[in-house]
Image (spheres, helix red, strand yellow):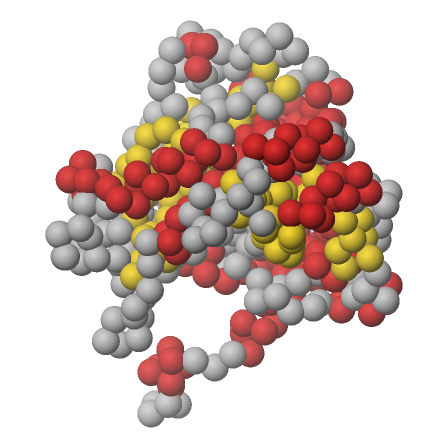
Amino acid sequence: MQFADIQEARDFLVAHPEVRSIELMLIDANGIPRGKLLHRDELLAIYQDGRALPSSILALTVQGEDVEATGLVWEVADADCWTYPLPGSLTLQPWRSTPTGQLQVSMHPTQGRPAAPADPRHTLVRVIERLEADGFHPVMAVELEFYLLDKQRDATGRPQPALQMNGVRPEAPQVYGVYELELVQPFLDDLYAACEVQGLPVRTAISEYAPGQLELTLEHRFDALQAVDEGIRYKRLVKGVANRHGLQACFMAKPFGDRAGSGMHLHVSLADAQGNNLYASEDPQGTPLLRHSIGGMMATLLESLAIFCPNANSFRRFQANSYAPLAKSWGVNNRTVSFRVPGGPAVSRHIEHRICGADANPYLAAAAILAGIHHGIREQIDPGAAIVGNGYEQATEFLPTDWLTALRALEGSAWAREALGEEFLKVFLAIKQTEYRQFMAEVGEQDWRWYLNHA
């Protein structure tokens, strides 16, 4: 675990005398930034001596409630745990109304106990280190789809796509529409500008398969940890820029039942120490290493599903002919499968993992993917024949479409305990099982509509 040098903080304070506040953020199990708003005079001390945060900060549900079963609340007296800054994370938040900095921290492996094993970034670091010990250097890129919503609900109280520059609320998908991008140009301009300030490699903008749905691609990185760090910070940035425009950026997996869900597609390949792509091949199906990687991800898919789809809403995204996968399947240049090998020149050969919802924690999703790849390589797992044509029609082994089945599969997985860590898994499962019970106990509008007059 590498932490930042204090000179980074000194340089920042000199370069930005206008900054008075700094947002300190730690990423929890749900991928939610938690932390504090600090005064600039506190910054140097954090680099020098770390910053204490309560152990319970990594024991929270998606609604920010303590989960006692994690063992990180009363059992350890909500102990202070020390965090330290991550290199390169100190930057500006240009969407704020007053000059504000941003600093990401992570738990110190020893000083951060008892909470350190629950830090999701640590989980990814451990998986990457194991791969690198065997000579494999993961290369990754993060793609996140999201909806740009109006902060005002519609007449029925439901969320709705944001008004465009022409004063019209979009209703048709208009996938790949360039005029639709023009109609949100002020938002995109500020988003690109903010990404440039923060050094985030954002590239192509796409109008996705629903009104108000967008995707901006992030460039791949030879350092997989850097790629995921940037994905985390990009998500925070998108929400901030949207808020500045009076809008809401929504990363729910399925905010609308009759419209496309939002996914997080993770692109991955393995390189040697010199950066040469070990998946590169003139064969569109890649090298044996690529196919063993897919075999490993397929073999561990059920056990990983609660990480890729961590919420009740996540499973609503799995619908046929929706560009969301439904089965253990792979193919070349095929968007109907779970593991897609995109076309292109041999040197660019890689795998696109298409299962995660946009609500997944990128650290944990990447860790589960890379651990599955490592498992497939070590066991030389054959993924079977690639799907040609419509993968929805040819599916034979479907993914479960309910949260509880996925949670039970993760809980019973010896592979997950070894790959992701026993201590981490205890905390994650305690949080998600608590959320499951709370979600199922809540009676809402759908219950009344279905059963109030007919049960």
Tell me residue 274's x, y (percent): 62, 8
Q: Report if residue 333 is visible in the image.
A: yes
Quadrant in which the C terminus is drawn: bottom left
Answer left or right for 193 relative to 407.
Answer: left
| Quarter location, residue 189 | top left
Answer left or right for 49 relative to 92.
Answer: right
Q: Is residue 278 above or below residue 426?
A: above
Answer left or right for 302 relative to 209.
Answer: right
Tell me residue 62's x, y (percent): 57, 62
Q: Is residue 156 above or below residue 347?
A: below
Tell me residue 271's x, y (percent): 59, 15
Q: Report if residue 29 is visible in the image.
A: no
| Residue at 29% from the left image edge and 61% from the top image edge | 150
Q: Is residue 217 above or below residue 149?
A: above
| Quarter location, residue 207 | top left
| Residue at 35% from the left image edge and 25% from the top image edge | 333
| Residue at 70% from the left image edge and 39% from the top image edge | 85
Answer left or right for 427 relative to 402.
Answer: right
| Residue at 55% from the left image edge and 78% from the top image edge | 441
Front-lying residue, 327 or 169: 169
Q: How many marks?
A: 0
Front-lying residue, 422 or 59: 59
Tell me residue 427's x, y (percent): 73, 56
Quadrant in which the N terminus is drawn: top right
